[in-house]
Amino acid sequence: MAEVQDSGGGNKKGKKIRSKKHSTHVDMTPMVDLAFLLLTFFLFTTTLNKPKAMEVMMPDDQIENPNPPEIKASNAMTILLSEKRAYYYFGFEDPKVESANYGPNGIRKVIITKKKECESRVNSKGEPERVTILIKPFKDAKYRNIVDILDEMNINDIKAYAIVDITPKEIEMIEGLATK
Protein backbone atom coordinates (compact mmCIF):
# COMPACT_ATOMS: atom_id res chain seq x y z
CA MET A 1 0.00 0.00 0.00
CA ALA A 2 1.43 3.34 1.01
CA GLU A 3 4.91 3.27 2.39
CA VAL A 4 7.01 5.88 4.09
CA GLN A 5 10.69 6.13 3.28
CA ASP A 6 13.14 7.74 5.62
CA SER A 7 15.83 9.89 4.12
CA GLY A 8 18.02 12.82 4.88
CA GLY A 9 19.06 14.68 8.02
CA GLY A 10 20.73 13.36 11.09
CA ASN A 11 23.43 14.27 13.63
CA LYS A 12 26.74 13.71 11.90
CA LYS A 13 29.63 15.22 13.72
CA GLY A 14 28.54 18.66 14.65
CA LYS A 15 26.33 19.47 11.78
CA LYS A 16 22.91 20.93 12.18
CA ILE A 17 20.13 18.61 13.02
CA ARG A 18 17.39 18.78 10.48
CA SER A 19 14.05 17.19 10.65
CA LYS A 20 13.68 14.07 8.59
CA LYS A 21 11.87 14.46 5.28
CA HIS A 22 9.49 11.65 4.54
CA SER A 23 8.56 10.89 0.94
CA THR A 24 5.37 8.96 0.29
CA HIS A 25 4.86 6.37 -2.42
CA VAL A 26 1.36 5.21 -3.32
CA ASP A 27 1.11 1.66 -4.62
CA MET A 28 -1.47 1.57 -7.48
CA THR A 29 -1.76 -2.23 -7.67
CA PRO A 30 -4.98 -2.50 -5.63
CA MET A 31 -6.63 0.25 -7.70
CA VAL A 32 -5.74 -1.53 -10.95
CA ASP A 33 -7.07 -4.79 -9.50
CA LEU A 34 -10.32 -3.07 -8.59
CA ALA A 35 -10.64 -1.54 -12.07
CA PHE A 36 -10.22 -4.94 -13.74
CA LEU A 37 -12.67 -6.56 -11.33
CA LEU A 38 -15.27 -3.92 -12.14
CA LEU A 39 -14.57 -4.23 -15.86
CA THR A 40 -15.01 -8.00 -15.83
CA PHE A 41 -18.12 -7.71 -13.67
CA PHE A 42 -19.81 -5.33 -16.12
CA LEU A 43 -18.71 -7.36 -19.15
CA PHE A 44 -20.19 -10.56 -17.74
CA THR A 45 -23.42 -9.04 -16.44
CA THR A 46 -24.44 -7.00 -19.48
CA THR A 47 -26.65 -8.51 -22.14
CA LEU A 48 -25.61 -8.08 -25.72
CA ASN A 49 -28.05 -6.74 -28.30
CA LYS A 50 -30.09 -9.53 -29.73
CA PRO A 51 -30.46 -9.47 -33.52
CA LYS A 52 -33.77 -8.06 -34.62
CA ALA A 53 -35.67 -10.07 -37.18
CA MET A 54 -38.31 -8.60 -39.43
CA GLU A 55 -41.60 -10.42 -39.12
CA VAL A 56 -43.09 -11.63 -42.37
CA MET A 57 -46.57 -13.07 -42.19
CA MET A 58 -47.07 -15.72 -44.84
CA PRO A 59 -50.56 -16.92 -45.78
CA ASP A 60 -51.68 -20.42 -44.96
CA ASP A 61 -51.35 -22.73 -47.98
CA GLN A 62 -54.57 -24.61 -47.22
CA ILE A 63 -56.81 -21.55 -47.32
CA GLU A 64 -57.94 -20.67 -50.81
CA ASN A 65 -58.74 -17.01 -51.32
CA PRO A 66 -60.97 -16.77 -54.40
CA ASN A 67 -61.05 -12.96 -54.22
CA PRO A 68 -57.57 -11.51 -53.84
CA PRO A 69 -57.48 -7.80 -53.00
CA GLU A 70 -57.87 -5.40 -55.92
CA ILE A 71 -54.74 -3.44 -56.77
CA LYS A 72 -55.05 -0.17 -58.59
CA ALA A 73 -52.83 -0.27 -61.70
CA SER A 74 -51.53 3.26 -61.15
CA ASN A 75 -50.29 2.27 -57.67
CA ALA A 76 -48.79 -1.09 -58.66
CA MET A 77 -45.09 -1.76 -59.00
CA THR A 78 -43.59 -5.18 -59.74
CA ILE A 79 -40.01 -6.04 -58.84
CA LEU A 80 -38.50 -9.10 -60.51
CA LEU A 81 -35.47 -10.36 -58.60
CA SER A 82 -32.49 -11.82 -60.40
CA GLU A 83 -29.14 -12.77 -58.92
CA LYS A 84 -27.32 -9.64 -60.07
CA ARG A 85 -30.06 -7.08 -60.84
CA ALA A 86 -33.59 -6.14 -59.91
CA TYR A 87 -35.98 -5.61 -62.82
CA TYR A 88 -39.08 -3.52 -62.32
CA TYR A 89 -42.12 -2.20 -64.09
CA PHE A 90 -45.21 -0.20 -63.21
CA GLY A 91 -48.85 -1.15 -63.71
CA PHE A 92 -50.09 -4.33 -65.36
CA GLU A 93 -50.77 -3.57 -69.02
CA ASP A 94 -47.91 -3.52 -71.57
CA PRO A 95 -45.03 -3.30 -69.04
CA LYS A 96 -41.83 -1.47 -69.88
CA VAL A 97 -39.23 -3.41 -67.92
CA GLU A 98 -36.18 -1.56 -66.59
CA SER A 99 -33.36 -2.75 -64.38
CA ALA A 100 -31.55 -1.42 -61.33
CA ASN A 101 -28.93 -2.68 -58.90
CA TYR A 102 -29.67 -3.61 -55.29
CA GLY A 103 -27.86 -0.63 -53.76
CA PRO A 104 -29.24 2.64 -52.41
CA ASN A 105 -28.67 4.36 -55.75
CA GLY A 106 -30.57 1.66 -57.62
CA ILE A 107 -33.86 0.11 -56.62
CA ARG A 108 -34.24 2.31 -53.53
CA LYS A 109 -34.45 5.47 -55.65
CA VAL A 110 -37.07 3.84 -57.87
CA ILE A 111 -39.17 2.81 -54.85
CA ILE A 112 -38.91 6.30 -53.31
CA THR A 113 -39.97 7.93 -56.58
CA LYS A 114 -42.99 5.62 -56.99
CA LYS A 115 -44.00 6.09 -53.34
CA LYS A 116 -43.90 9.90 -53.65
CA GLU A 117 -45.88 9.74 -56.89
CA CYS A 118 -48.61 7.62 -55.26
CA GLU A 119 -48.73 9.74 -52.08
CA SER A 120 -49.26 12.87 -54.16
CA ARG A 121 -52.66 11.48 -55.24
CA VAL A 122 -55.63 11.38 -52.86
CA ASN A 123 -58.15 8.51 -52.75
CA SER A 124 -61.94 8.79 -52.27
CA LYS A 125 -61.55 8.86 -48.47
CA GLY A 126 -59.27 11.90 -48.67
CA GLU A 127 -56.17 9.89 -47.73
CA PRO A 128 -52.99 9.70 -49.80
CA GLU A 129 -52.80 6.59 -51.96
CA ARG A 130 -50.29 3.84 -51.14
CA VAL A 131 -47.96 2.07 -53.49
CA THR A 132 -48.39 -1.71 -53.72
CA ILE A 133 -45.28 -3.69 -54.62
CA LEU A 134 -45.29 -7.23 -55.96
CA ILE A 135 -41.98 -9.03 -55.40
CA LYS A 136 -41.32 -11.90 -57.79
CA PRO A 137 -38.04 -13.85 -57.45
CA PHE A 138 -36.59 -15.35 -60.64
CA LYS A 139 -35.13 -18.89 -60.62
CA ASP A 140 -31.54 -17.63 -60.16
CA ALA A 141 -32.38 -15.22 -57.33
CA LYS A 142 -30.54 -15.86 -54.09
CA TYR A 143 -31.90 -15.67 -50.58
CA ARG A 144 -29.82 -12.53 -50.06
CA ASN A 145 -31.65 -10.80 -52.93
CA ILE A 146 -35.01 -11.37 -51.23
CA VAL A 147 -33.63 -10.16 -47.90
CA ASP A 148 -32.24 -7.03 -49.62
CA ILE A 149 -35.65 -6.22 -51.14
CA LEU A 150 -37.45 -6.85 -47.85
CA ASP A 151 -34.94 -4.49 -46.19
CA GLU A 152 -35.80 -1.87 -48.83
CA MET A 153 -39.51 -2.31 -48.02
CA ASN A 154 -38.71 -1.72 -44.36
CA ILE A 155 -36.38 1.24 -45.01
CA ASN A 156 -38.88 2.97 -47.30
CA ASP A 157 -41.83 2.20 -45.00
CA ILE A 158 -43.79 0.33 -47.67
CA LYS A 159 -46.86 -1.15 -45.99
CA ALA A 160 -48.37 -3.09 -48.90
CA TYR A 161 -46.12 -5.62 -50.58
CA ALA A 162 -46.37 -9.30 -51.44
CA ILE A 163 -44.00 -12.05 -52.50
CA VAL A 164 -45.66 -13.93 -55.35
CA ASP A 165 -44.68 -16.39 -58.09
CA ILE A 166 -43.20 -15.11 -61.30
CA THR A 167 -45.22 -15.70 -64.49
CA PRO A 168 -43.86 -17.33 -67.67
CA LYS A 169 -44.31 -14.02 -69.54
CA GLU A 170 -42.11 -12.24 -66.98
CA ILE A 171 -39.49 -15.01 -67.22
CA GLU A 172 -39.33 -14.43 -70.99
CA MET A 173 -39.01 -10.66 -70.44
CA ILE A 174 -36.07 -11.09 -68.04
CA GLU A 175 -34.32 -13.61 -70.25
CA GLY A 176 -34.82 -11.27 -73.22
CA LEU A 177 -33.26 -8.37 -71.28
CA ALA A 178 -30.39 -10.51 -70.01
CA THR A 179 -29.40 -11.53 -73.56
CA LYS A 180 -29.27 -7.88 -74.74
Image: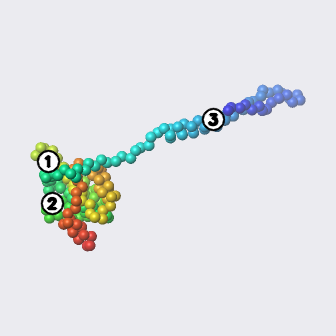
What numbered label is drawn on residue 122? 1
Spatial CA distance of label 3 from label 2 is 75 Å
Residue that sits furthest to the bottom in the current view = 180
What numbered label is drawn on residue 30? 3
Q: Residue at x 18, y 59 (%)?
A: 90
Q: Residue at x 16, y 51 (%)?
A: 65
Q: Residue at x 60, y 38 (%)?
A: 32
Q: Is residue 144 left or right of residue 163?
A: right
> Given the image, on which type of amino acid does mark 2 rest?
Phe
Q: Position of residue 28 (x, y in %)?
A: 64, 36
Which of labels 1 and 2 is toward the front?
2
Q: Position of residue 177 (x, y in %)?
A: 24, 69
Spatial CA distance of label 1 from label 3 is 71 Å
Which color mode does the image show?
A: rainbow
Q: Residue at x 30, y 50 (%)?
A: 155
Residues packed near mark 3 inside 10 Å, few (<14), some (14 to 19) or many (20 plus) = few
The residue that label 2 is drawn on is 92
Whether residue 27 can be seen here: yes
> Given the image, on which type of amino acid does mark 3 rest?
Pro
